[in-house]
Image (cartoon, rainbow, N blue to C red):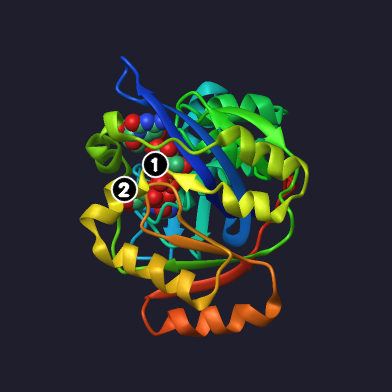
């Protein structure tokens, strides 16, 4: 038996850090939304009990370091599953980019294997399991738009933001999330207005969304990688309505309402940047 599952990327419309916790993680408040840029996972049941990972991408580990492998292992051990699975990952989302590609692959594996192995778990149960793999996995289990708190694993669903294009530009560098959190200076943070962002989303107020994007991790990544700041400036200059780094970076995204500006920004950026995408927000939950 085979199953295809989509694993969409996320962007952080806002990302605030409240404090560092005794367990070493940071308490966050993030508004996250999924976008129409997705990896595709093919899950093929095997009878030998083994978990195997295949991928065309040389940046993706094909062993137990792969987050999709960890998802399969977690379900297999916790629910005493005898069957195995081969997970083929068609990688579209740039790796180590601040777009939660690995987390979304893990979440897609959880959703898919729940079906393939007939486990009958709810999404809420899968999201709790996902938090054992990584802080962003719970959000990716649901997709759509949400306020994520705690270390990122506590999810409150929000309505879809007003429709617009999202342009993504990813320079040729990979950023370590742990490193960025470690270098964050908590004393100098200018906090984004998370409440105002939530209100703008609820009211479908596009200007309000654009006016309230903010990410406290930007400062760290921009300081260490000046070309991320350059890409931000270019995107603003080409006419995006709002520009922000996603997650720990280095991907920069721009929000664009009008089709007429889209080509200009997209083509302009392609001269500067390794990978550029123009996609839609998914906004709503993407439940298979
Ligand atoms: C920054 C964000 C924003 O969405 O995403 P990315 O840039 O990775 O996409 C997330 O907070 C990343 O989530 P995720 O990538 O799942 O993080 P984890 O694997 O749980 O943690 C990696 C490391 O980041 C640090 N970490 C992570 C989350 C958090 N709330 N506080 C932390 O300090 C810890 O040092 C941890 O060891
Ligand atoms: N399925 C996967 N896809 C991408 N990266 C993965 C995967 N499994 C494990 N990784 C590892 O996770 C790290 C973070 O990758 P990713 O999730 O793409 O970035 P981010 O946390 O910035 O959103 C990478 O260094 C990669 O080696």
**Residue at the (63%, 37%) spot, across then down:** 196
Position in image of residue 203 (x %, y %)? 78, 44
Foreground pick, 93 / 97:
97
Q: Is residue 106 left or right of residue 217?
A: right
**Residue at the (71%, 50%) spot, across then down:** 161
Q: Is residue 177 above or below residue 127?
A: below
Secondary structure beneath label 1: loop
Q: Quadrant of ligand 1?
A: top left
Position in image of residue 8 (x %, y %)? 59, 54
Residue 115's mark? none
Q: Is residue 149 above or below residue 164?
A: above
Q: In this view, does 131 lie above or below 228?
A: above
**Residue at the (39%, 56%) spot, across then down:** 97
Foreground pick, 197 / 20:
197
Q: Is residue 262 above or below residue 280?
A: below
Secondary structure beneath label 2: helix
In this figure, which residue is indicated by the disc labeled 1? 216
From this viewpoint, which residue is outermost toward the top? 22
* Inter-mark Cα distance, 1 to 2: 6 Å
Position in image of residue 238 (x %, y %)? 50, 77
In this figure, which residue is indicated by the disc labeled 2? 219
Q: Are marks 1 and 2 in contact (CB under 8 Å)?
A: yes
Q: Residues within 10 Å of mark 1 (few under 14, many from 20)?
A: many
Position in image of residue 145 (x %, y %)? 66, 43
């Amino acid at each position: 038996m085979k199953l295809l599952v989509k694993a969409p990327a996320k962007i952080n419309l806002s990302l605030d850090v409240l404090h560092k916790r005794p367990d070493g993680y940071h308490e966050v408040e993030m508004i996250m939304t999924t976008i129409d840029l997705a990896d595709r996972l093919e899950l093929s049941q095997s009878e030998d009990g083994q978990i195997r990972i295949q991928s065309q991408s040389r940046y993706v580990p094909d062993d137990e370091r792969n987050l999709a492998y960890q998802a399969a292992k977690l379900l297999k051990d916790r629910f005493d599953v005898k069957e195995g699975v081969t997970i083929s990952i068609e990688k579209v989302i740039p790796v180590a980019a601040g777009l939660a590609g690995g987390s979304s692959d893990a979440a897609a594996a959880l959703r898919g294997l729940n079906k393939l192995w007939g486990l009958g778990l709810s999404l809420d149960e899968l999201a709790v399991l996902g938090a054992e793999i990584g802080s962003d996995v719970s959000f990716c289990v649901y997709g759509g738009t949400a306020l994520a708190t705690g270390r990122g694993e506590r999810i409150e669903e929000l309505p879809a933001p007003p429709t617009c294009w999202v342009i993504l530009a990813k320079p040729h560098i990979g950023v370590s999330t742990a490193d960025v959190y470690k270098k964050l200076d908590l004393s100098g943070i200018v906090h984004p207005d998370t409440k105002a962002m939530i209100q703008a989303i609820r009211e479908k107020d596009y200007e309000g969304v654009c006016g309230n994007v903010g990410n406290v991790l930007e400062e760290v990544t921009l300081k260490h990688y000046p070309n991320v700041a350059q890409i931000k400036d270019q995107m603003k200059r080409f006419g995006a309505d709002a520009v922000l780094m996603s997650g720990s970076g280095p991907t920069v995204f721009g929000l664009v309402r009008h089709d007429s500006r889209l080509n200009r920004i997209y083509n302009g950026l392609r001269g500067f940047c390794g990978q550029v995408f123009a996609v839609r927000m998914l906004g709503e939950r993407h439940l298979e």
